[in-house]
Image (tube, rainbow, N blue to C red):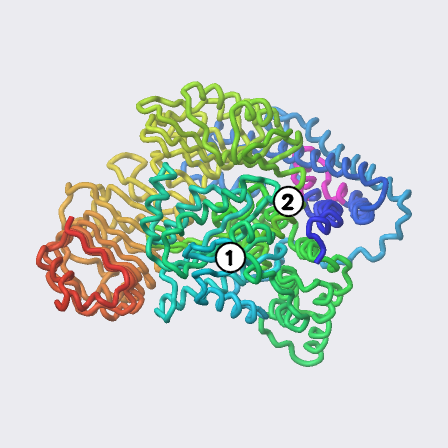
Amino acid sequence: MADPITAALAVGWGLQAVGWIASPIISEIFKKGSSFLGFDASKKLKELEPKVLLLERVMEAVEDSLDRPRLEQLFKDLKSAFYEAEDILDDVEYHRLEKQIQDGKLKSDGDSAIRWVKKKLHSAIPSPPLKDQESGMSRHQLKSSFEKIEKVINDACAILERLNLPPVTDYNWRQVVPPNSRSAVTTAAPPLKVIGRDEDRDKIIAMLHDKECHGHESTNIGLCYSVIGIHGIAGSGKSTLAQYICDREKKDKEEEKDGHFDLVIWIHVSQKFDLQAIFTEVLEGATGKPFSEFKNRNTLRENLVKELRGKRILLVLDDVWYNIRDAGHQGELEQVLSPLEVAKTGTKILVTSRSKDALVALGAVGERCIPISDLNYDVFLQMFMHYALRGAVVPGHDGIKLQMLGDEIAKKLNRSPLAARTVGAQLCLRPNVEFWRRTRDRDLLNETMGALWWSYQHLDEQVRRCFAYCSIYPRRRRLKRNELVQLWMAEGFIKTTNAEEEPDGVGQDYFDELLSASFLQLAERKMEHGCEVDYFTVHDLLRDLAEEAAIGDCFKIDEGFRGEVPPDVRHIFVGSCDRKMLTEKIFQLQNLRTLIMDHALEIELTDVKFLESMFTRLQNLRVLVLRFNGLLDGGIFLLPASIGLLKHLRYFYFRLDAEMKLILPDSITKLYHIQLLDVAQASRMDFSGAKHMSHLINLRRVSPGLDFPNIGSLKWLQILQGFFVKNKLGYEIQQLKQLNKLEGRLAIMGLQNVRGKEEAIEASVAQKERVTELEFIWDDRSCSPEVEAEVLEGLCPPKYLEKLEIINYQGSTYPNWMVSKENGGPEHLRNLWLYKCSRLEPAPELFEVFVHLRWFRLWHSNWDALPDNMEQLTLLQVLDINHCPNIRLLPALPQSLEKFNLRAGNEEFTRSCETTGDPNWQKIQHIPHKTIRRV
């Protein structure tokens, strides 16, 4: 296989330019600007269209031309002019909205504002030009930007004559897909299917279970473990093979087969690894519990050694990098393995790496350094056709042609598994002979990177921009779906085609398209707070592609960076940085749109001036993520009022990890474009401008703890997390009525302030179908149990709810939706947690309605028994009983249980669960993990 970086450089820049120029970006910006400048956008676009087509041909042909440097500069100038025009139009929208608010034309319910914004964003019909005083801008600025765009296009096309290109007669070499007609894509990664690796798998598994732990051929002689390694280039299938083996060993462990490992742990190491982070991951993998309290590496290592002692372990170290010229690197790698010295004989380490040197450094030698084998062509063709057809059968002559064309395409992919997956995913979306024939004839399929670029080009332009933006993150960074979509929205990458289409939904479609085409991959699925959370990553080879696609726009600052920051960069991720670099380099980038501080700076009271300088200089920011930490206990930190200058800001995340009071300025309520506002980390917060928060009509996500009235006017709101009902104007439970876009977790507190069922119904909880976790909380006992029962009856949750917590409920009856299938309520509830519901009695009906429970938690309850029908909960995994003194006997429990937690129960009951042979003891013997505590 050719070196992927070389391949990328050969095709990258020209394709990046072609894709960007061919996109709807230029036409869209002209259409938006026409209403401001008062010209006919369609006429101007008709003049530019043939020039844009010529410019595409120039960009394609320029790779080996002496004119490339000049065109590269012209391309940069074109993007710069576009960004400038976009910023001006964004200012226009801001000032329009500001004027509407000042004139009092926004109704309190926010509906007119939303209709107005959507109309202005989506309408392409020219309207009378604005006066300068209405927009707050000079039309001359926008006119100048548009003239720059035209000039760059004209200058670039003038080079065509010198290149002696053929006429533009075969432009339609690729199928242009309109933005509003994207093909349907799957919503989850396809099931893992491993083809052609059986021999490698069996060979490695045999090594994992051989009997050579004493005196094996390894530099680890005398140790209880041995190292086996897989090496090969990026995208060749190393991690897939290791995962295949890892999953097999996990199943053997679960089935307790002879010779199974006591622990199977998977760790991704990567190019720059932190030893403390790896030790923490190994400890979490060994215990199944999260750890964050160990600040001292020695303490962490001691706890890790204690957990691993005497156990036979399989540790998989994925993607280990090694610099043979770095004398200290081998010692760092050896430290990774040092805690395993106390493990049981027969422990194995399975390593994957691009470099054989890394395997040798860790102790794998000879036949234990296994090169990932090249697939023979027949097996590779089988893999490729699996991805290209996904098992679909195309009947008749077309099916035969697709098989023949698939064979011809596969021969151009150099047997790269990653290329098979990415190209195959695109073919799968268009199973027609003509498209496959055009694919076969493309020159870009000659190399793996060329194939990846080709697949990238067949994504919509907006989807390409979203993928390129992912390069801002470190390699193998775990990414959450909703966080990425929110960032894409903030950057303006998501384009809707009509006023009724929600940007969030379109962003989710973009994400699914990238997932389906393997540009994003599911990395892991974790249980967090009782719910499954998916984390995604970008494969290394595709990451190289993303960096090429984003070149000039995205930049990362890692630890030890001392170079220059490109002056025209738009998006910066700071992994490690000091104040000097921020003030002397980053604060000078006045065109910056994204600043993500992943590294926390030590907080100082003088940082008010530091932030004031940032807000004053970086006024084009759309995304701003800041993290501070420190020990200024009891201090007061005032966020500068100059944050109100960030008129373009959509995404503001501010973390203050210090015991101090945070004062927010009123000017936050002037950030009319803001979509995400997350500032609640300080122990105390003061926000005098809360009464004007309803002006932020674009707000979608707000941090917990940010208390303000009239939240019901924010119709776009999606993440609220907590709402406190008060006997105060603007805090009524009816404020939730129209907020039906809410999603994720929602805690409704202060329910003692709701006066009955009718008021509770006004919250329309059942209509919030995207909410997956609900908490109903009574904070005191100021209302009667009868009223509480009415209120709970009126709070019927949505049918898609996954987790329900009821806290401090003093009613003596269950609502109908909890005990009867005929009364609505959640249909597939997974977690039911009851806290301090002291008047409720056991109800077998609960487990007839909620038959899909995975986790049942009963805390501080007066139940005298668990219902006898618990055994029918065949999916239940966790049973958690805490401070339930009246329970004396367990019923028959489901065989699916994995964890049983009993704490502070009746002493006799507790003792019976620990006494061998006791009926209660017998009923929990099939449960793998049991925790029984008296306090």
Q: Quadrant of the N terminus?
A: bottom right
Q: Is residue 452 visible?
A: yes
| Figure quadrant of residue 181 | bottom right
Identify which residue is drawn at 54% across, 34% down. 559
- The image shows residue 838 at horizontal and vertical percentages of 14, 51
Q: Amino acid at mark 1?
A: Ser
Task: Name the mark on residue 218.
Answer: 1
Which residue position is annotated with label 2? 547
**Nearer the observer, 718 or 421:** 421
Please tell me whether residue 907 is drawn above or below residue 648 in the rendered image.
below
Query: Which stretch appears magenta?
Result: 28-45
Question: Left or right: 782 with respect to 483?
Answer: left
Q: Main secondary structure of the magenta part?
A: helix
Q: Nearer the viewer, residue 660 or 177?
A: 660
The answer to which image quadrant residue 29 occupies is top right
Q: Position of residue 579 (x, y in %)?
A: 51, 24
